[in-house]
Amino acid sequence: MGERVLDAGGLIRTFDDGTGVRGVDIWVAPGEIHALVGLNGAGKSTLMRLLLGMLKPAAGTITIAGRRLDRTDWTTVGHLVEYPLAYRELTCRQNLALGARLHGVAPARIKAVVEASIAELRLTQYADRRAAKLSLGNRQRLGLASALQHDPRFIVLDEPTNSLDPAGVILLREALLRRAESGAAVLVSSHHLDEVARIADRISVLNAGRIIGTLDPEGVDIERSFFELVHNDDAAAA
């Protein structure tokens, strides 16, 4: 797989309510889909915000494509964390064109990139509808299209199947597999174990802000293995 695209070690960031991450090491290689799973409150979103520079760690190091966060070329990164961001008064097509421009897509290529993204996420009939008028599922598709359309080399998605219907879940699955096959490094968090097991090369389990083990994507009873890991970790902590 080659050199790691993401390499983070010893990450610590906690909050007054006791949540956060504590000493997390995580990495993703080119062409790999690394899934991060955990119960609500385990620290998945906090970790992803740290990896994207949205939060500053109290300790630890993060590099993306061999560069520190403050020197990262963000045009090579695509992300969707928690909620899809879109200008409510702009149409899907306008939002995507703006996103492409911000991600450094050459002006001459923006129209083609946007149209390809609209087709990939099946947004054609909503392309000229304002974001404010979209359903939650189509707003999620728009956010995913914006995160993926510039062919980023590192993709970070937090609970990306939220609000998606089954057809949308399949479209996303296929889109991520295509990008991994082309060499992109993908980090995706989810509480849908059966879904991430379909696409992940590795699955790490996060509990109480710590990575406590891994799961075999091809395991027979992956859900049971997950809950055993979490239960045993909680029992040891108690």
Image: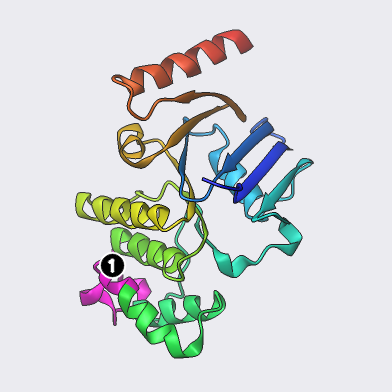
Which residue is at a point 28% across and 78% down the rendered structure image? 127
Crowding at mark 1 (Cα within 10 Å: few <14, some 14-19, many 20+) = some
**Residue 128 lies within the magenta run:** yes
The correct choice, above or below, for 54 with respect to 12 in the image is: below
Q: Nearer the viewer, residue 218 or 131?
A: 218
Residue 229 location in percent, x, y? 48, 17
Residue 211 versus residue 142 in the image, above or below: above
Highlighted range, magenta: 117-135
Q: Dividing the picture into quarters, in which one does residue 41 lie?
A: top right
Please tell me whether residue 35 belongs to the stretch shown in magenta. Answer: no
Residue at (35% x, 32% y) in the render: 193
Hey, which quadrant is residue 10 in on the image? Answer: top right
Q: How many marks?
A: 1
Point out residue 215 in the picture as x, y percentages from the top left corner: 43, 25
- Up the image or down, 71 lies above or below 194; here it is below
Residue 91 shows in this picture: no
The residue at the point 51 percent across, 85 percent down is 106
Instruction: Identify the residue position indicated by label 1 in the image.
Output: 120
Residue in the foreground of this view, choosing between 89 and 7: 7
Q: Which amino acid does label 1 sit on?
A: Glu
Q: Residue at x 20, y 76 (%)?
A: 125
Picture layout, residue 193 above or below residue 224: below
Secondary structure state at the residue bearing disc 1: helix
